[in-house]
Amino acid sequence: MDSFAALSLFDMLSGLRRGDFSAVELTRACLARVERLEPALHTLITYTPELALEQAGAADRRYAEWRRDDPSAAWNLPPLLGIPVMIKDVLCLKGVRTTCGSKILENFIPPYTATAVQRLLDAGVAVVGKSNTDEYAMGSSTENSAYGPTHNPWDLQRVPGGSSGGSAAAVAARLVPLATGTDTGGSIRQPASYCGVTGLKPTYGRVSRYGLVAYGSSLDAVGGFARSAAEVALMVHTMAGHDPLDSTSAALPVPSYGLEGASLKGVRIGVPAEYFIEGIQPEVEQAVRAAITQMERLGAAVQPVSLPHTAYALPVYYLIAPAEASANLARYDGVRFGLRESGDAMWDVFFHSRGAGFGPEVKRRIMLGTYALSAGYYDAYYGQAQKVRTLIKQDFEQAFDMVDMVACPVAPSTAFKLGEHTDDPLAMYLEDVFTLPANLAGVPGLTFPVGFDARGLPVGMQLMGPHYKEDSLLRAAHAYQHVTDWHMRSPDLSI
Amino acid sequence: MSLTQAEVEHIAQLARLDLTEEEKARYREQLSAILDYAARLRELDTSHITPTASVLAASLPLREDEVRPGLSLQDVLSNAPQAEERQFRVPPVLE
């Protein structure tokens, strides 16, 4: 493996501070690895090597100033200075094409930058590219990207999960130490599980959604991927916090995500029976149960809990998310931005542009959401789904009266084959059965690797906690990762 | 339940989506299956449950209505498929 690819984020940061290598050298090594592996993996929609080198050059100048002026004060360096990252292609970066994996935005150049991305830029990152995603983040495999699927680094015949599959695969393949993701129904946690990396979906409202192209506005969350909990903690902490440009962003202080001395002693972990259902791949259940036992040995108090409405999360989500999507995607009309197909009258332009520009899954969800919101069906579908959403939220509130967090599988199986579910949308939706409830309740979810199946595919575990308790989840995962090495394993990419 | 062809066409009309005959047939079948699956929500008695539109507990913040700089006209028009002077150009809206 390339020598830089073996380094952790913290190795990179200390190497840069010591001057063992420059940010430009680190970025060049990263670009070389991307160029070697990208033909097999296809993690990116837009590759931005010039931008990355320019930002790395600026980082080196900053390090040089710091060394000259005050090398003792490491704290006044931006926290991610000179670190190469990828940005999921649903987050706007001014001047760089943002497609959302859709043909309809093939030539869209955003005139502003998302707040979460701006905070990473302010922290000193070098952006290597915009990573692949299912179109408008709608999917569980990255096969719905209009720019072709991403391949799982552990088995190139398999999907990386989705929708943030490009970012998850890139971190798994050690192309970059950090990549952003977004999660509306599992789009960070499920690909993190399939690719054997650590992924954090923060509490709804913890990270600003300004500049995130909207899919399901009451569900969308911005987060990220890294190899370990400690690394993803630094990234998400950088992005988190109140933003006046997003009225749903929480006006609460973000506590330190410092994980020094993190311990599981006395942490109350609930195990919800509803997440260990029939049909789950036996190796997934075994690996997750083994990890829970390990956490118990590390001092956690494990007890059963019930989240009784879990089985209803799937129908609730697949009414609410498409309903919100059908409203959000009404803006793509071929007038102000995006693809325009010609037509004699304005109406024809709307129909033709949307018909030609959106892919099959996006059209399916727009149709479903439009139906659920239409006169005569609103109460029976959308209204009922919003009421059952309340019950799902209450399940978590009751569980968190008794425990600090719950531990469960991320997905019923490990990564499936490309093309395996593309003809059956309902089968694809079932991949999300364990990740949807966190979005409906707005609670944070953290996924990290806890083993492998017989085919050598990673198995992930999910921790979910009360609102704004990302720090508790990160500390628990860090304590587990301190004594295990699943998160250190790398796929064989001698291709 | 099974959606009719007319219902599928009505939804596509509401959503301003051109669909081919093949797409209409496929969505008719797939949406019917998904809505069948969703019908299990009716098993639950929700007559006394308040719907959740947002998980946020706090009320939404207000701010002073101050004049602030926004995007420049050039930025606003930079992605327009067709623009003319200070405007987006579109085909006729009225006959």
Image: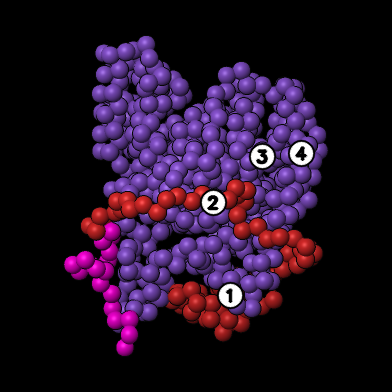
Residue A356 at x, y percent in the picture:
39, 70
How is colour applied across the structure in the image? by chain
Q: Secondary structure at mark 3?
A: loop
Q: Secondary structure at mark 1?
A: loop
Chain label for disc 3: A
Other-residue count near label 3 (Cα within 10 Å), few / some / many at <14 / 14–19 / ≥20: many
Q: Is residue A238 left or right of residue A197?
A: left
Asked if disc 4 and disc 1 are in contact, CB closer than 8 Å, the reply is no
Other-residue count near label 1 (Cα within 10 Å), few / some / many at <14 / 14–19 / ≥20: some
Q: Is residue A162 above or below residue A446?
A: below
How far apart are the two marked residues, 4 and 2, measured between alpha carbons? 26 Å
The residue most toward the bottom is B95
Residue A82 at x, y percent in the picture:
34, 27
Q: Which chain is red?
A: B
Figure quadrant of the N terminus of chain A: top left
The main secondary structure of the magenta stretch is: loop
Q: Amino acid at mark 3?
A: Pro
Which of A362/A28 is in front?
A362
Residue B87 counted in the magenta span: yes
Which callout, 2 or 3, points to the residue nearer the camera? 2
How far apart are the two marked residues, 3 and 4, measured between alpha carbons? 10 Å
How far apart are the two marked residues, 4 and 1, measured between alpha carbons? 38 Å
Q: Is residue A363 left or right of residue B75?
A: right
Q: Amino acid at mark 2?
A: Leu
User: Are discs 1 and 3 located on one and the same chain?
Assistant: yes
Asked if disc 3 and disc 4 are in contact, CB closer than 8 Å, the reply is no
Residue to which mark 2 is pinned: B60
> Which shade of the palette goes to chain A?
purple
Where on the picture, by quarter, is residue A371? bottom right
Q: Earlier in the sequence, mark 1 or mark 3?
A: 1
